[in-house]
Amino acid sequence: MTKIPDKPTLDGIEQRWSDQWDADDTYRFDRSAVRQDVFSIDTPPPTVSGSLHVGHVFSYTHTDTIARYQRMAGKQVFYPMGWDDNGLPTERRVQAYYGVRCDPSQPYVEGFEPPFRGDPPKKHQAVPISRPNFLELCDELVEIDEELFEQLFRRLGLSVDWTLKYATIDERSRRISQRAFLRNVERGEAYSQEAPTLWDIDFRTAVAQAELKDEERPGAYHKIPFAIVGDEANSIEIDTTRPELLAACVALVAHPDDERFQPHFGKKVIVPLYGQEVEVRAHELAQPDKGTGIAMICTFGDTTDVTWWRELALEMRAIIGRDGRILPDAPHGVDPEAYALIAGKYPNQAQRAVVEQLTEQGILIGEPRKITHPVKFYEKGDRPLEIVTSRQWYIRNGGKDADLRAALIARSGDVTWHPEHMRHRYENWVEGLNSDWLVSRQRFFGVPIPIWYPLDDAGEPVYDSPLVPDEADLPVDPSVDVPAGYTADQRDQPGGFVADPDIFDTWATSSLTPQIAGDWEGESDMFDRIFPMDMRPQGHDIIRTWLFSTMTRSHHEHHVAPWHHAALSGWILDPDRKKMGKSSGNAMTPEGLLEQFGTDAVRYWAASGRPGVDTTFSEEQMKVGRKLANKLLNVSKFVLSFGDVDMQGPLGDTVTDPIDRSMLSKVDAVIAEATAGFEAFDYARGLERTESFFWWFCDNYVELVKNRAYEAMGPDAAASARRALREALSACQRLLAPILPFATEEAWSWWNDTSIHAAAWPTPSDLGGDAALVDPTIEALTLVRRAKSEAKVSQRAEVAALAITAPADMHAALDAGRPDLAAAGTIADITLDDGTDLACSVTLAPTD
């Protein structure tokens, strides 16, 4: 029995159906399902840093279309949602939202109230607060943000099982993150060392290779002579953009094949101003065509300096501290009086001081020559990175191990990439690695590194003998908890212990999303039912970070790729073809769009974007999507209004008219193509093919056969048309369900008692009809309509005579459609003759 509303509308259906899905557990994952019946998704946990933008709507819709398809295709879909709420983005938001900054030296204040909550005064200075107080504010704000995120994702119609929700700072995430890391340590895949590290002086934290960005910045070459020891009348001239690092110089370097400098290899030169003697060395990374062809090696100006320093076994003369200032004490061999003039300065201040000295003493050759050159920044930072020496934790990722690098490249072959060319981005990134993965951060809101170190009798940490907790005790906070065999009063005391002060980089936790979402080695056996996961959806811009880091952790722990498929979404572009995002300042929040156009319309726009392809933001596309959703409701009402139809009887016994069979053959082709699209994770292809047929169905077939469906040609002819109409409508509703979940559920409910999202994906009818048979009749009807429009008469106007000329091989098809054509066009007489092409001569009946 159908339940058709008098006036179908999209208004108000979203909340109603969202509530119904919740009440019915429509998207609940069956935790008893066996692995072969499961389709598991490694859902990206969005960064909790204020608000979601239209890019999230775009990419999460893509994932949801696949989830909905797989559910209808018979799979139990494991579709969790996580919140990536630890790390620097959250800290920055907390600082701005509450007007505070974390200062671990501050005492804890019970019941601390921040200066404001989200409404800052015009002028304010951040209040320093203790780390525990700061973490309390982090917990408070992420709870607020995560609730808003969930509301938006529910509004978007994501078919997530919300009982599978997690956060990267919750107890399960901390436990799993610490367990995986301790096993990395035990197997030698993780290690700590004191080493040169890229450092952001504003955030006071180390930065990994994957988090870098290059920005073109102005600079200048300064030509400086280095006198040759024993031949001081002669010198070697170098060009440098960083004269402030002369005090950190440990060698000069030129290419081994550069004949200009071959006679000087092994000789020593004197560093101007500071007096240390350094050797001229050879290395293939030196560029003969850059500057004067010979460079100074400093500890450290850039990452190439680090490579030279390490491979040439040079001494250390570090002069930049963690605060970004020149260290107070001169390095070994450096004139302390000259050094005192730059001590305590920031590098840009020190550069001005050094250039003044070089100029005053007549050392600088010529004027500085202005250039622009790429400078490395932390992707979230505002000042150029420095390189400082610090103790950090690393996970081996092939950057220093050719065999591991080859193994991780080979892992890409275990994954099917959508689109395929994204595989090359992954492989190119791995091939270009030159360092292991730095996973420690000198921040506050994150998963603590679960390590302590014994202190010797002098109170110095013994880093080679770390103290680790038992896995059964995880998660731990080393700053609060005490290692086995020690007491709390031994903390920070000679002969006692000290906690590792750092937290994990947020990627080190989110690289374990399959394990966290699947409760790896937890109380349930769910992990075995979902891993390796079927699908990793994500943006192509974080292949180097999230995708590669997850691959690395899975390779180390499980010796497999963590998923079978990687589905990449592109970026959203503004009308100027620029990426839309918060950092670009052109991001758009989606609430207004969802309100203006409706969820299905916004999802339609998103699903029109090809996998991995950047897509232009388009409200026009959303208008088309809303039109499609409205048309679905209206045509559903129209088709269902013909009366009840027995949908259980044999289809071939009811659908007897060759025109109806022809249409259903077209439906079969659409089902096959849409299915192939979704199976290939190409939701856009499925939508495109379905939409094209749907409009043809509405505009042509329905108009052609509606008179027969009204029993104008008898009950048997009507039964054939009605059953065919409903079969096609059922298929269209289900084919569009992954894209337009609300409109399809609404229309489906008018004649079904269960959710369309629990219905089976359509399969071909295989009636064997000729898909092309209906086309000549449709073409003839189109020509008749055109003639009426040109004559400016109603489409209901009578046609006295229709003369059709067509090739002989079309005659049988036109004869089959003759009754429907006559009824649809209100045509009294139809004649059919041979012709080269199909053409129609329309004679309208005279009007009074």
Image (spheres, rainbow, N blue to C red):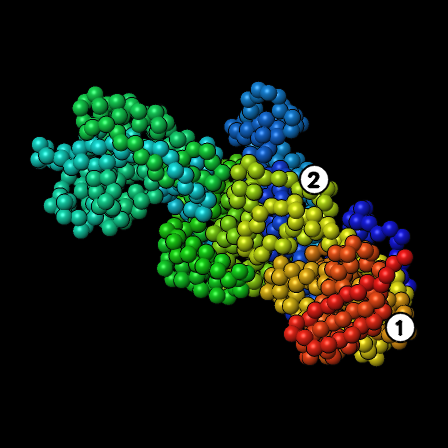
Kindly identify the residue that appears in the image at 40 percent across and 35 percent down. Answer: 384
Q: Of 132 and 383, which appears nearest the observer?
A: 383
Q: Do the numbered discs 1 and 2 sit on residues whose CB atoms are within 8 Å?
A: no
**Number of the label disc, if any, that sits on residue 713:** 1
User: In the rendered image, which quarter contains the N terminus?
Assistant: bottom right
Q: Three-letter amino acid code at disc 1?
A: Met
- Could you say where residue 662 lies in the image, as x and y percent from the top left? 74, 74
User: In the rendered image, which quarter contains the C terminus?
Assistant: bottom right
Residue 186 in sight: no
- Name the side, left or right, on which 2 lies relative to 49: right
Q: Three-letter amino acid code at disc 2?
A: Gly
Q: What whole-number distance in Å separates the C-alpha atoms at marks 1 and 2?
A: 50 Å
Please tell me in which quadrant of the rendered image residue 729 appears: bottom right
Residue 579 vertical placement versus 63 (above, below): above
Per the image, label 1 sits on a secondary structure element best described as loop
Kindly identify the residue that appears in the image at 65 percent across and 74 percent down. Answer: 836
Mark 2 crowdedness (10 Å alpha carbons): few <14, some 14-19, many ≥20: few
Q: Nearer the viewer, mark 1 or mark 2?
A: 1
Q: Of 57 and 497, which appears nearest the observer?
A: 57
Per the image, label 2 sits on a secondary structure element best described as helix
Residue at the spot of label 2: 592
Residue 11 vertical placement versus 610 (above, below): above
- Name the side, left or right, on which 830 lies relative to 282: right
Kindly identify the residue that appears in the image at 66 percent across and 60 percent down. Answer: 687
- Could you say where residue 219 lies in the image, as x and y percent from the top left? 33, 33
- Could you say where residue 570 lies in the image, as x and y percent from the top left? 55, 51
Residue 323 in sight: yes
Please tell me in which quadrant of the rendered image residue 159 appears: bottom right
Earlier sequence position, callout 1 versus callout 2: 2
